[in-house]
Image (cartoon, rainbow, N blue to C red):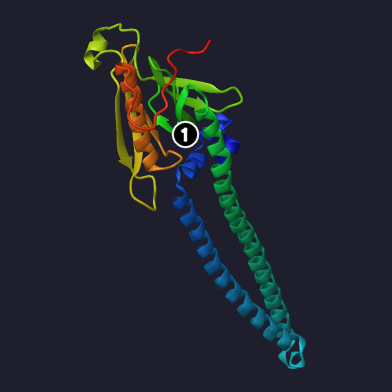
Amino acid sequence: MLWSLTKWNQKLSSNRLVRWWLRMTVLDRFIMVITVNIVYVIASFFAFSFWLVNFLAHMLVEGAVSGPLSNYLGEEVVSGGSFILGFMNFNSAIIIFFEVIFSIAVWAFTIFFVIDIIWDFIVTRNDLRNLTAKNNIILATRGEYVGGYPQLPHSRFVYLIISGTQKNPYLGIMLPSLQKKEFQVPLLDVTGAKSGIDDKFGKPGIFNISSTGITPSIWKGYRSILNVEYTSAGRKYQVELGSFLRGNDEVQQWKNFLTCTQSEADTGKVPYGQWKSLPKKKKK
């Protein structure tokens, strides 16, 4: 749900808290919700215990101040007792107020967690199915653009696609705003031009795919990052992509698909097994 609410706005989608939430796996979020609820139960237990002690003390003081003993205590003691009663009433009100606020916040967070999972499972995956249903898209997912593209200075979550034609495939970075924008990382460079800088980094179109591990997840091991190196206009760039919707296994799948797409463009041979080839020509 958070993705659907923020993906239309560049400023919101690049917000650190938004990216932090989307970066977490379902397990990360589940453990966080459970932890928050455990803290809530413990805090509520102590709050109730303090309120109960305060309530019992209030009854004793009120009985002493307002009962028959008040005639023997004197005005100063009765006045002090009244002040203590007022302070106890204030404490009870504060405890109840914060308990209500805390309860609303915890329940709202838990409900948001459940709705967000269901929304991601239905809406986001439906968007990806619609993308992959197109003739010129092999694979699509949601992932985090970490950095490295020369025209994208801000990290944010995006839709990633493998698209193009057999002779000119590319990795697409789609920003799902009201006016959709797509940035292309070429898997092959069809110009064949060379320069001194090109010689330094290899022929235009030299393309390297690798994956590394980072640890943004508090709860479990390493999380993979997909590194895509390519040359464009005589310069070398490395685009980093991570936090794929379906986790580390999908990162490995994308690495394989990108390699096979490039190989099919180079050799014309269809990769083994279940495979969807890009169209030979771009539709006009």
Relative to the observer, which residue lies in front, 179 or 69?
179
Residue at the image position 55 percent from the left and 30 percent from the top: 130
The answer to whether 21 is drawn above or below residue 198 in the figure is below
Q: Residue at x 53, y 22 (%)?
A: 181
Task: Give SS at disc 1.
Answer: strand
Up/down of 55 relative to 124, above or below: below
User: Is 88 placed above or below 36 here?
Assistant: below
148 or 160, which is in the foreground? 160
The quadrant of the picture occupied by the N terminus is top right
User: Residue 6 vs residue 153: left or right?
Assistant: right
Residue 243 percent across, percent down from the top left: 42, 39
Number of marks in the rendered image: 1
Position in image of residue 97 (x %, y %):
67, 63
Q: Is residue 200 visible?
A: yes
Q: Residue at x 33, y 27 (%)?
A: 271
In the rendered view, does 199 fall on the left or right side of 218? left
Asked where in the image residue 255 lies, by quadrant, the reply is top left
Amino acid under disc 1: Thr
Which residue is label 1 attached to?
A: 141
The answer to which of 115 and 166 lies nearer the viewer is: 166
Q: Position of residue 160 (x, y in %)?
A: 46, 29
Spot occupied by residue 200 in the image (x, y as percentages of width and height): 22, 14
Residue 136 as seen in the image, left or right of residue 215: right
65 to the left or right of 98 = right
- Residue drawn at (64%, 58%), measured in percent from left and top? 104
Decide: few, some or many residues near mark 1? Use Cα within 10 Å; few <14, some 14-19, many ≥20: many
